[in-house]
Image (cartoon, rainbow, N blue to C red):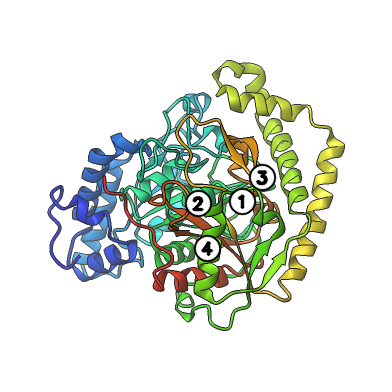
Amino acid sequence: MNAPIDAPADAARLATATAAEIATAVASGAVTARAVIEATLARIAAVDPKVNAFTDVTAERARASADRIDARRAAGAPLGPLAGAPFAVKNLFDVKGLPTRAGSKINRDLPPAACDASLIEKLEAADAVLVGALNMGEYAYDFTGENVHDGASRNPHDLTRMTGGSSGGSGAAVAAGLVPIALGSDTNGSIRVPSSLCGTFGLKPTYGRLSRGGSFPFVTALDHLGPLGRSVADLAAFYDAMQGEDARDPGQSPRPFEPVSGLIGQGADGLRVAVAGGWFRSRGLPEAFAAVDLVAASLGVSAVVDIPDAARARASAFIITAAEGASLHARRLAARAEDFDPAVRDRLFAGLAIPASWVDAAQRFRRHFREEMLKLFEKHDVLLAPATPCRAPKLGQKTFVLDGEEMLVRPNMGLFTQPISFIGLPVVAVPVRVDVGDAPELPLAVQVIAPPWREDLALRVAAALERAGVAVAPVAGL
C-alpha cells in the first residue's frame, strides 16, 4: 500500500489489503481515498458477476464520500480511524435512496429509505466508505445464501458451492476481495455460517450491544448485527466504531463504550479455555470437529465441558423464530403469498400455527438455559465449538448425511450456532483449514464463545490464532 494505486490496474492489489492497511495509507497520503474507491469499484465490476454478492452498488455516493475525505486531508483536518476503508452492508440495512430489500421481492416496492441505518452512520462518521448493498436470503430466513429473486450468492472458493446464509452476500464479498469488511445480521447463525463456509472472520456481538436502528427485522428477540472481515484487527476497529447508544433501537442495552482494539494484542495466555462437548461433538462431519481440535491444540486446551440442554435450546430457538417471524409477516402473507420464496413462505405459514403456550415455554426455558451457561463461565473464560457441521454444500443441494442420518441442509446448517445466539452470547467465528474429509481446500470456522459483554475475550483468542497462522481468511483467486 506504499506505492500509489492506479485504478483499475491495481484493483486486484486492494483485494488482499485490510481496512487497517487502507486507512493507514489514506491517512499518510500514500494513496487517496478516491483511488481506493475507484480500484474497489473496478474489482466489483470485474469479479462480482461471478459471485453475485452485490444487489446494489452505490458508486457515485462512494466517490463523493472519498472526495470529501481527500479534501479534508488536503486541508490538514484529522481523519477518522477508518479513513477510506470500503465496506458494504447486507441489504436489510437502510441505505438512503434505496428500497430496503431484505432479500425479498415484496420490499422492493417500498419507497426508498429516507436515511441510513444507524451503523452505517457510525461507520461513515469514522470515515469508512459505503460501496453498496449485498445479497441475502429472503427476509433473513435462510442458511444457504440461495435467493430466488436475486439469484444465489456463490462461494468464492468454489463457485459451485453455497456461501451460507442468510448473510451470504456479505461472506462472498469479503472472501472474493471486493471489500475488506461487510456488515451482516445474525438471528440463528447468519454471520457465523457464511463466515465458516466462505472462510472469513465474523463477529456476532452480545445481544443488545450494537444498534439495530434502520435495519429490517426478522426476530426482534434474537436479531444481532455485526461485521465479517479478513482480519481480527478490522473486526475490532469496525466494532469499536459501531458502539454507542442509539434511540432508534429501543432493545439496545445501555452499555458504556468499551473499546477492544487496544486489547486484542494481549493474546490468549492466562485465559481459561475449554472445548464444548456433548451436542457440539455430534451430528457433524469429521472435519468440523478436526477444526475445533486444531484450534484447541494451538491454544494448549484439553478441558472439555458439556453444555446442558443445547438440543432443547436449539428447538426453543426454532419455535421463537418461526412464531415471531410469522407474526411479523402475517399481513404480507395474506396479501402477497405468491411473491415469497416458497420455502420461506411455507415455514412462515407453519409459524402462524404455533400455539402461544409453546412460545411462552420456549422463552421461559431461554432464561433457564442462560443461567446454566453463565455457571459455566464462572470456571471458563472462553468456549470453543464448531460453527457449521460441514464445509460448503453444493448449490441446490437439499440434504446431507450427519452422524449417519440424512438431514435437510437449509435448517441444519445452524446446528451449532442456534443454541448460542438463543441467549445472545458474543462469538467470533475463526476460519481454519484442515486436511480432513472431502475438499480440504475449503474453509471451516470455529466459534470462540465468550460471556455476555466480553467481546474482547473472544477477539483476543481469535487474534492469537491469527498470529499463530492457525486462523486464516484468504482471498479467493478469482
Dots 2, 1 in contact, CB < 8 A? yes
Query: Which residue matches tag 3?
Result: 220
Q: Position of residue 471 (x, y in %)?
A: 43, 64
Callout 2: SS: helix
Mark earlier in primary sequence (1, 3): 3
The amino acid beneath tag 3 is: Thr
Mark earlier in primary sequence (2, 1): 2
Local packing at callout 4 (Cα closer than 10 Å; few below 14, some 14-19, many 20+) is some
Q: Position of residue 122 (x, y in %)?
A: 45, 57
Q: CA distance from mark 4 to mark 2?
A: 10 Å
Q: CA distance from mark 4 to mark 3?
A: 19 Å
Mark earlier in primary sequence (4, 2): 2
Mark earlier in primary sequence (4, 1): 4
Query: Which disc, if any, is residue 118?
Result: 2
Q: Position of residue 165 (x, y in %)?
A: 51, 41
Mark 4 or 1, closer to the camera: 4
Mark 1 or 3, closer to the camera: 3
Mark earlier in primary sequence (4, 3): 3
Q: Nearer the viewer, residue 290 or 164?
A: 290
Relative to 460, say whether 306 is above or below: above
The amino acid beneath tag 2 is: Ser
Relative to 407, say whether 80 is above or below: below
Query: Which residue matches tag 1?
Result: 249
Callout 4: SS: loop
Question: Which residue shows up at 66% across the image and 56% down it?
Answer: 280
Q: Position of residue 402 (x, y in %)?
A: 62, 43
Query: Which residue matches tag 4?
Result: 243
The amino acid beneath tag 4 is: Gln
Image quadrant where one finds the C terminus? top left
Relative to 303, say whether 391 is above or below: above
